[in-house]
Image (cartoon, coloured by chain):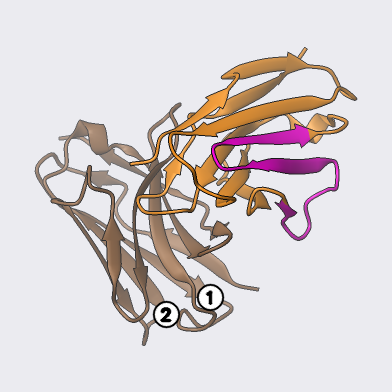
Amino acid sequence: QVQLQESGPGLVKPSQTLSLTCIVSGGSISSGGYYWSWIRQPAGKGLEWIGRIYTAGSTNYNPSLKSRVTISVDTSKNQFSLKLNSVTATDTAVYYCARGGMVRGEDLWGQGTLVTVSS
Amino acid sequence: DIQMTQSPSSLSASVGDRVTITCRASQSISTYLNWFQQKPGKAPNLLIYAASSLQSGVPSRFSGSGSGTDFSLTISSLQPEDFATYYCQQSFTTPRTFGQGTKVEIK
Protein backbone atom coordinates (compact mmCIF):
# COMPACT_ATOMS: atom_id res chain seq x y z
CA GLN A 1 0.00 0.00 0.00
CA VAL A 2 1.01 3.61 -0.44
CA GLN A 3 3.31 5.02 2.22
CA LEU A 4 4.77 8.48 2.76
CA GLN A 5 8.10 9.27 4.40
CA GLU A 6 9.48 12.71 5.23
CA SER A 7 13.20 13.40 5.08
CA GLY A 8 15.41 16.41 5.69
CA PRO A 9 17.51 18.22 8.28
CA GLY A 10 16.24 18.18 11.82
CA LEU A 11 17.96 21.45 12.70
CA VAL A 12 17.83 24.70 10.76
CA LYS A 13 19.40 28.03 11.72
CA PRO A 14 17.25 31.15 12.02
CA SER A 15 16.86 33.12 8.77
CA GLN A 16 17.79 30.07 6.71
CA THR A 17 15.61 27.82 4.55
CA LEU A 18 13.86 24.72 5.82
CA SER A 19 13.83 22.02 3.13
CA LEU A 20 11.95 18.73 3.40
CA THR A 21 11.14 15.97 0.94
CA CYS A 22 8.33 13.43 1.06
CA ILE A 23 8.98 10.15 -0.71
CA VAL A 24 5.90 8.29 -1.88
CA SER A 25 6.28 4.51 -2.07
CA GLY A 26 3.94 1.67 -2.98
CA GLY A 27 2.18 3.58 -5.74
CA SER A 28 2.56 6.33 -8.32
CA ILE A 29 2.30 9.91 -7.10
CA SER A 30 0.58 10.71 -10.40
CA SER A 31 -2.31 8.28 -10.11
CA GLY A 32 -5.68 8.67 -8.43
CA GLY A 33 -6.19 12.40 -8.83
CA TYR A 34 -4.82 13.16 -5.38
CA TYR A 35 -3.10 16.26 -4.14
CA TRP A 36 -0.03 16.19 -1.90
CA SER A 37 0.17 18.43 1.12
CA TRP A 38 2.30 19.60 4.01
CA ILE A 39 0.98 20.14 7.52
CA ARG A 40 2.84 21.10 10.68
CA GLN A 41 2.29 20.84 14.40
CA PRO A 42 4.29 22.73 17.06
CA ALA A 43 4.89 20.74 20.22
CA GLY A 44 1.73 20.48 22.28
CA LYS A 45 -0.33 22.48 19.78
CA GLY A 46 -2.77 21.91 16.95
CA LEU A 47 -2.41 21.25 13.25
CA GLU A 48 -1.61 23.94 10.67
CA TRP A 49 -2.09 23.23 6.96
CA ILE A 50 0.84 24.68 4.99
CA GLY A 51 -0.19 24.00 1.40
CA ARG A 52 -0.68 21.45 -1.34
CA ILE A 53 0.34 20.57 -4.87
CA TYR A 54 -1.27 18.55 -7.64
CA THR A 55 1.04 16.53 -9.85
CA ALA A 56 0.14 18.81 -12.77
CA GLY A 57 1.90 21.50 -10.75
CA SER A 58 -0.89 23.71 -9.41
CA THR A 59 -0.45 24.82 -5.81
CA ASN A 60 -2.40 26.37 -2.97
CA TYR A 61 -0.73 27.85 0.09
CA ASN A 62 -1.89 29.01 3.48
CA PRO A 63 -2.01 32.81 3.26
CA SER A 64 -0.28 33.01 6.64
CA LEU A 65 2.84 31.40 5.12
CA LYS A 66 2.42 32.10 1.42
CA SER A 67 5.23 34.63 1.12
CA ARG A 68 7.77 32.11 2.47
CA VAL A 69 6.59 28.74 1.12
CA THR A 70 7.26 26.79 -2.03
CA ILE A 71 5.94 23.28 -2.66
CA SER A 72 7.19 21.37 -5.69
CA VAL A 73 6.76 17.88 -7.12
CA ASP A 74 9.11 15.55 -8.98
CA THR A 75 7.01 12.83 -10.55
CA SER A 76 10.07 11.04 -11.95
CA LYS A 77 11.29 10.49 -8.38
CA ASN A 78 7.79 9.97 -6.94
CA GLN A 79 8.31 12.69 -4.37
CA PHE A 80 7.33 16.20 -3.45
CA SER A 81 9.10 18.86 -1.44
CA LEU A 82 8.63 21.81 0.90
CA LYS A 83 10.79 24.89 1.18
CA LEU A 84 10.13 27.46 3.89
CA ASN A 85 12.48 30.41 3.90
CA SER A 86 13.46 32.99 6.50
CA VAL A 87 12.62 30.63 9.35
CA THR A 88 12.38 31.66 12.99
CA ALA A 89 11.91 29.75 16.22
CA THR A 90 8.14 29.85 15.66
CA ASP A 91 8.63 27.50 12.70
CA THR A 92 9.85 24.76 15.03
CA ALA A 93 7.37 21.91 14.65
CA VAL A 94 6.74 18.36 13.53
CA TYR A 95 6.21 18.54 9.78
CA TYR A 96 3.93 16.00 8.12
CA CYS A 97 3.44 15.21 4.46
CA ALA A 98 0.08 13.80 3.43
CA ARG A 99 -2.03 12.65 0.51
CA GLY A 100 -5.32 14.41 0.01
CA GLY A 101 -8.53 14.18 -1.95
CA MET A 102 -11.44 16.51 -2.60
CA VAL A 103 -13.86 14.53 -0.45
CA ARG A 104 -11.70 12.81 2.16
CA GLY A 105 -9.21 15.56 2.84
CA GLU A 106 -5.82 14.32 4.00
CA ASP A 107 -6.41 10.57 4.20
CA LEU A 108 -2.84 9.24 4.36
CA TRP A 109 0.01 10.78 6.38
CA GLY A 110 3.72 10.30 6.80
CA GLN A 111 5.06 9.65 10.28
CA GLY A 112 6.25 13.23 10.66
CA THR A 113 9.67 14.78 11.16
CA LEU A 114 10.71 17.23 13.86
CA VAL A 115 12.41 20.36 12.61
CA THR A 116 13.96 22.65 15.19
CA VAL A 117 14.96 26.21 14.33
CA SER A 118 17.88 27.21 16.51
CA SER A 119 21.35 28.67 16.21
CA ASP B 1 -10.11 31.43 6.25
CA ILE B 2 -12.87 29.21 7.65
CA GLN B 3 -12.57 28.93 11.43
CA MET B 4 -13.30 25.55 13.02
CA THR B 5 -14.26 25.50 16.68
CA GLN B 6 -14.40 22.27 18.65
CA SER B 7 -15.99 21.65 22.02
CA PRO B 8 -15.11 20.64 24.56
CA SER B 9 -11.33 21.18 24.52
CA SER B 10 -10.95 18.17 26.78
CA LEU B 11 -13.12 15.62 28.49
CA SER B 12 -12.74 12.78 30.96
CA ALA B 13 -14.66 9.59 30.36
CA SER B 14 -14.71 5.95 31.36
CA VAL B 15 -14.42 2.83 29.25
CA GLY B 16 -17.86 2.05 27.87
CA ASP B 17 -19.10 5.64 27.95
CA ARG B 18 -20.78 7.29 24.98
CA VAL B 19 -18.78 10.36 23.97
CA THR B 20 -19.75 13.20 21.64
CA ILE B 21 -17.47 15.94 20.34
CA THR B 22 -18.83 18.88 18.39
CA CYS B 23 -17.29 21.04 15.68
CA ARG B 24 -18.65 24.31 14.34
CA ALA B 25 -17.55 26.02 11.13
CA SER B 26 -17.56 29.80 10.75
CA GLN B 27 -19.48 29.44 7.48
CA SER B 28 -21.34 26.67 5.70
CA ILE B 29 -19.11 23.86 4.46
CA SER B 30 -21.87 21.49 3.31
CA THR B 31 -20.57 18.06 4.38
CA TYR B 32 -16.89 18.71 3.68
CA LEU B 33 -15.91 17.79 7.22
CA ASN B 34 -13.39 15.19 8.34
CA TRP B 35 -12.47 13.79 11.74
CA PHE B 36 -9.00 12.63 12.77
CA GLN B 37 -7.65 10.79 15.80
CA GLN B 38 -4.12 11.51 16.99
CA LYS B 39 -2.19 9.58 19.62
CA PRO B 40 0.98 10.98 21.25
CA GLY B 41 3.99 10.88 18.94
CA LYS B 42 1.92 9.66 16.00
CA ALA B 43 0.47 11.20 12.85
CA PRO B 44 -3.26 11.94 12.72
CA ASN B 45 -5.42 9.09 11.43
CA LEU B 46 -8.56 9.72 9.36
CA LEU B 47 -11.69 8.34 11.04
CA ILE B 48 -14.63 9.98 9.28
CA TYR B 49 -14.82 11.84 5.98
CA ALA B 50 -17.62 13.76 4.30
CA ALA B 51 -19.16 14.31 7.74
CA SER B 52 -20.56 10.79 8.14
CA SER B 53 -18.61 8.27 6.04
CA LEU B 54 -16.49 5.79 7.97
CA GLN B 55 -12.95 5.43 6.67
CA SER B 56 -11.99 1.87 5.81
CA GLY B 57 -10.65 -0.06 8.79
CA VAL B 58 -12.13 2.26 11.41
CA PRO B 59 -14.33 0.57 14.05
CA SER B 60 -18.07 1.07 13.72
CA ARG B 61 -18.32 2.57 17.21
CA PHE B 62 -17.16 5.82 15.57
CA SER B 63 -19.82 7.83 13.76
CA GLY B 64 -20.20 11.34 12.45
CA SER B 65 -23.12 13.58 11.61
CA GLY B 66 -23.98 17.11 10.60
CA SER B 67 -24.02 19.48 7.65
CA GLY B 68 -23.68 23.18 7.03
CA THR B 69 -21.92 24.58 10.08
CA ASP B 70 -22.57 22.08 12.90
CA PHE B 71 -21.05 18.64 13.14
CA SER B 72 -20.45 15.95 15.72
CA LEU B 73 -18.29 12.88 16.26
CA THR B 74 -19.69 10.15 18.50
CA ILE B 75 -17.92 7.18 20.03
CA SER B 76 -20.70 4.82 21.06
CA SER B 77 -18.74 2.83 23.63
CA LEU B 78 -15.33 4.21 24.54
CA GLN B 79 -12.50 1.68 24.41
CA PRO B 80 -9.04 1.95 26.03
CA GLU B 81 -7.41 2.56 22.65
CA ASP B 82 -9.70 5.55 21.99
CA PHE B 83 -8.02 7.80 24.53
CA ALA B 84 -6.43 10.35 22.21
CA THR B 85 -6.88 13.82 20.75
CA TYR B 86 -9.52 14.33 18.06
CA TYR B 87 -9.47 17.02 15.36
CA CYS B 88 -12.05 18.14 12.85
CA GLN B 89 -10.94 19.54 9.48
CA GLN B 90 -12.85 21.28 6.73
CA SER B 91 -12.08 20.26 3.15
CA PHE B 92 -14.53 22.73 1.58
CA THR B 93 -11.87 25.20 0.55
CA THR B 94 -8.24 26.17 0.97
CA PRO B 95 -6.56 26.78 3.25
CA ARG B 96 -7.72 23.61 4.90
CA THR B 97 -8.32 24.39 8.56
CA PHE B 98 -8.53 22.25 11.66
CA GLY B 99 -10.30 22.58 14.95
CA GLN B 100 -8.12 23.15 18.00
CA GLY B 101 -8.54 19.55 19.14
CA THR B 102 -10.41 17.66 21.84
CA LYS B 103 -8.36 15.55 24.23
CA VAL B 104 -10.22 12.50 25.53
CA GLU B 105 -8.76 11.35 28.84
CA ILE B 106 -9.41 8.49 31.20
CA LYS B 107 -11.66 9.28 34.16
Q: Earlier in the sequence, mark 2 or mark 1?
A: 1
Residue A49 - label: none
Check the rendered structure and report the hue given to chain A: brown
- Say left or right for A5 vs B16: left
In this rendering, is residue B5 above or below A104? Answer: above
Local secondary structure at mark 1: strand
> Residue at 71% of width from left, 49% of height from top?
B52
Instruction: Residue B63: name its quadrant.
Output: top right
Q: What shade has chain B been given?
A: orange
Mark 2: amino acid? Asn
Boundaries of the magenta span: B53-74
Whether tag 2 and tag 1 are in contact, CB under 8 A, the answer is yes
- Position in image of residue A46 (x %, y %): 45, 33
Q: Position of residue A59 (x, y in %)?
A: 28, 67
Residue A6 in percent (x, y) is at: 42, 59
**Magenta-drawn stretch contains B66:** yes
Q: Which residue is mark 2?
A: A78
x 62%, y 24%: residue: B103
Instruction: Locate the N terminus of chain A by quadrant.
Output: bottom right
Q: Circle 1 sits on which residue?
A: A25
Residue A42 found in image quarter: top left
> On what subunit does the disc labeled 1 rest?
A
Few, some or many C-alpha atoms within 10 Å of disc 1 (few <14, some 14-19, many ≥20)? Answer: some
